[in-house]
Amino acid sequence: MPGKNFNPTRSCHEPKHHVLPVQPIGFSMNISTFDLFKVGIGPSSSHTVGPMIAANRFAAYLHDAGLLDAVHAVRVELYGSLGATGKGHGSDKAVLLGLEGNLPDNIDPDHVEPRLAEIRSSKKLLLNGSHAIGCVEKEHVLFFRREALPQHPNGMRFVALDAAASVIAEKEYYSVGGGFVVSKEGQRVNLVQAGSVQSEGDLPYPFHSGDDLLRMCAESGLTIAALMMENEKHWRSAEEVRTKLLGIWDVMAAAVKRGCSIDGELPGPMRVKRRASELYRQLKERSEESFTDPLSMLDWVNLYAMAVNEENAAGGRIVTAPTNGAAGVLPAVLHYYTKFIPGSNKDGVMTFMLTAAAIGLIYKENASISGAEVGCQGEVGVACSMAAGALAAVLGGTPEQIENAAEIGMEHNLGMTCDPVGGLVQIPCIERNAMGAVKAINAARMALRGNGKHYVSLDNVIKTMMQTGADMKTKYKETSRGGLAVNVIEC
């Protein structure tokens, strides 16, 4: 049985084995807009949101199997990228809170640190919210920096132990990006929000590629957003879709607002200064300059993106779009639409969100949105592609121009590594979101100047992104063992 040979005295910094090549988990299933855009907490969808969901599901499994009362302790083993950067990404905190029954969309970020302090001081946690068990972190939450489980770089093993330290139950989960979690058998296990879906059923427009999407738009006469709305209506009413989408937008806007109002430093030893609040004050005080500087709008776009990602880095409430590490791109570009485009309205917000979701779902099914699997091209790159296509849509683009904008957005992010300094979602992640947002705006403008005809299709660039990720060295994929992570002194 896996885990039998575990040696609690071996240092996590002295690995027994090197990382093994992993086989990507297939993810060919229909998912909803609201599975892609999930309300959660920072700093990482794959390293915080996913592990919390996995821990929650394991605790629920123990309860449902009638095993809860026999559990004396739970050992959590984090592998691959989770082992390498999980500490900086809050994976240890996430699994403790998840084992207590919390989920990312309903936990109060302000209660996280006080509750963790109680767990650590008492050396006990409430499994599934009710059953007290022992918890000593250095014994029960273990990081394997250079070992990987076979199916994905973000692997987790949960082991329930009785009073004699014998194994009662064991489960493996994989956090495959964007807060999605699958079991060892490849079954999706995360149900973060009520109404999330797991099967295609009788969707009116079950597209699986960019070519599918364009063909169905041409045959039906629908825009991409309208086609997505028809699919969403398979699970909920049009009014429910509208209410939920605008609710997601409200969370995005709240993250910008909060990020613009808080000074101080971000968590972690680097003591990174929060910059969004000072930038906001500067822009408010110098509003007259906007009449003489035609690029002052970019300062605001930078602000919106940085505000969200500072909130994410601080463990605040944000929306995975499609990941936490890339959560600032879409809100920044959507703020650009609502603040700078005449005639913007809530219908436009709906169009933006549904179009972005359609593009994101194609990436999720045919490639990856996991930085640990394909590098940051799968996070900020995908967010840039989604935002570019969505902006082209609200600016009146045809389906072909929207597809072109999305393709441009990714084509010029190909090969981007994920090399967080100190394993924290701060450097270069915060500025990288601002750059992704600006690229998205430019990609949309370039596409709208054309007629939608271009040489490289969205499907081709998605395939290329996945191949590039496979070719990329592991050290550049969210391990903090390459790139800026090793060339910047953490002090």
Image (cartoon, grey):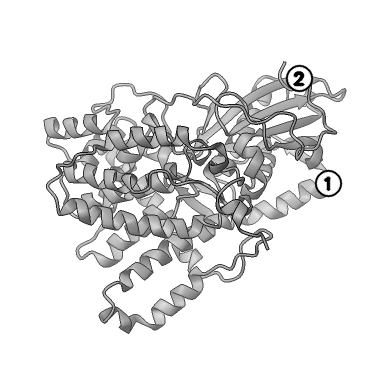
Q: Position of residue 95 (x, y in %)?
A: 66, 39
Q: Nearer the viewer, residue 119 or 86?
A: 86
Left or right, 484 with respect to 200, comes to right
Left or right, 69 with respect to 113, comes to right
- Quadrant of residue 163 in the image? top right
- Quadrant of residue 109 in the image? bottom right
Q: Position of residue 251 (x, y in %)?
A: 44, 54
Quadrant in the picture for the C terminus: bottom right
Give the labeled residue for mark 1.
122
Kind of residue indicated by mark 1: Ser
Give the labeled residue for mark 2.
168
Kind of residue indicated by mark 2: Ile
Left or right, 84 with respect to 24, comes to right
Structural crowding at the residue carrying mark 1, measured as other residues with C-alpha within 10 Å and reported as few (<14), some (14–19) or many (≥20): few
Label 1 SS: helix
Earlier along the polypeptide chain: callout 2 or callout 1? Answer: 1
Residue for point 17% across, 35% down: 217
